[in-house]
Amino acid sequence: MNMNQLLSSTTRVRTPLQRRLIVAFTVAASLVVAAPSEAATCASLMSAVMPDVRVDLAQEVAGGAFVPPGPAPNAQAANPYAGLPSFCRVAATVRPSSEAPIGIEVWLPVNGWNGRLRGIGNDGFYNSAPVGFAAMAAALRAGYTAVASDGGRQGDSSYILRSTEQLTNFAYRATHEMTVAAKALATAFYGNGPKLAGVAECGGRGSIGLSSVQRYPADYDAVAVGEFIGDSTRHMANQWWVWQALHLDPASAIPPDKFPMIQRAAVAACDTVGDGIKDGIIGDPTKCTFDPGVIQCKAEDGPDCLTAPQVAAMRKIYAGATNPRTKARVAPPLMRGGESYWTPLIGPNPNAVSIAFFKYFALRDANWDYKTRPLDFDTDIAKADAQTAVLPINVTNPDIKAYVARGGKLMLYAGWGDPFVPPGISVDYYTKVVETIGKKAAQDSVRLFVVPGMRNCPGTGGADNCNFDPMAVVQQWKETGMAPDAIVAPHFQNGKEVGTRLICAYPKVAAYKGSGDAHEARNFACRMP
């Protein structure tokens, strides 16, 4: 098929390859770029022609002059955009369907472009979320061309009952459309396309990376995904399992101030498990067998013990969500040693996101009231599975052969202390990927890091955290060909740097060598458990 046939065949692109060819051809033609080294002006991008894309703004923004759209910022607060370099800002609207437009932003550095594109995720699965300007700003400061979207979502979660177009946008279409457009605009603006396209997101925004790897393997070259949210049924089911274990019977409810006590008891029982040293962190929680019965009250209830119903609730949580009829596992359990992180799941009401998932998506019943009709871990999970089989919400396909065949690198990471998404979900997906693509391909192209003590995403906050840059890790891997089998990261506790930590590629764990400061990574080695 020649280019004229491609352009005239249909108004919608039939395949990703056709779409990339059309975009590359039409943008170059509309801007009359004569040679690969010839660049366009920012203003000229206003006339860029791309299928289903309308450029709404193409404007050069002077250094420090950017003001995000929307309500005026607090005059007393520090301006997070004050230090931005000058850039070409392109705002556009993509209309892949008549009812669900997608808003995108592409920011192109005027000077100092590092030759790379960075995709930014969006949190708006259940409620509309704006473009992530702060994350775009961070990418721009690092020299990237940054691209983000509003997810193609409007309003609250009840949209799922009316249409699936917005769901399709958020699940994968918005990411693909914005990426195709950003590459074309970068090629036109600089005269050369990005030498590398990467994504590094954690939590709700992580689906941008997984959907690309699984559905559009040519979109990105280096992808890092933290806190695997790709299996919505499983991680939402876990949240309900925890809440119902604590609240269906009022006697089972555990006051929030008891959870740090439970964690201290779990750590005391398993501190040396995995890493071989008492350092206040369980090195391999999967091997910890702490039983909350050891802290059951001998007489009446108290702040340093659990009642018999509370012990039963904790045992149920540690066991993980289970189908009451078949006894099959529904979701992996939360890990021992992270109990103080469970606060968002143990309150008087379930997590709002998990309510929305089952009410609007799985059960499709806006009148469902969990207080009068609790979640059924047999029939309701089956309904959720039936919905995910036909609607594009999950990103669990382990067959990423096309992505790794073209040299793509995928880094998965999680915290053993994560309360929202059981880390076992990341382990399960990684295991399935290895089984599907083969050990050799996985060794070359896929890594999983599960961090002891960490909640979900790296940084400096929280009771225990490690501050590493997943984008830097996976980008270096792609560009040098040297796979990361371990990461040495600054270690923080309660916001204070206390040393360094060795983070090993799964399934290995960091084991103490037998001497030296337990807060220094050099005194640990990666070993099989």
Image (cartoon, rainbow, N blue to C red):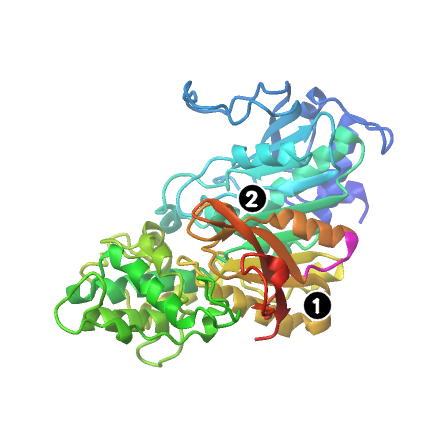
Q: Amino acid at mark 2?
A: Ala
Identify residue for label 2.
174
Secondary element at image label 1: helix
The residue carrying pointer 2 sits among few (fewer than 14), some (14 to 19) or many (20 or more) residues within 10 Å by Cα, namely many
**Disc 2 to disc 1, how far (Cα)?**
31 Å
Q: Tell me the number on the disc at residue 451.
A: none
Image quadrant holding the C terminus, namely: bottom right
From the viewer's perspective, tell me whether residue 138 is left or right of residue 130: right
Q: Residue at (69%, 73%) from the top-left corner?
A: 439
Where is 192 relative to 175, above or below?
above
Q: Which residues are magenta?
A: 480-484
Where is 303 relative to 152, above or below?
below
Residue sitting nearer the eye, 287 or 142: 287
Q: Earlier in the sequence, mark 2 or mark 1?
A: 2
Residue 145 position by quadrant: top right
From the viewer's perspective, tell me whether residue 293 is left or right of residue 388: left
Residue 519 position by quadrant: bottom right
Magenta stretch containing residue 301, yes or no?
Answer: no
From the viewer's perspective, tell me whether residue 132 is left or right of residue 505: left
Extreme residue in the bottom direction: 326
Residue 340 in the image, given as x and y percentages of width and height: 35, 57
Residue 2 position by quadrant: top right
Residue 68 in the image, given as x and y percentages of width and height: 51, 25
Q: Amino acid at mark 1?
A: Gln
Q: Residue at (72%, 48%) from the top-left corner?
A: 18
Residue 194 in the image, given as x and y percentages of width and height: 75, 40
Residue sitting nearer the eye, 25 or 409: 409
Magenta stretch: dominant SS?
loop
Identify residue for label 1.
443
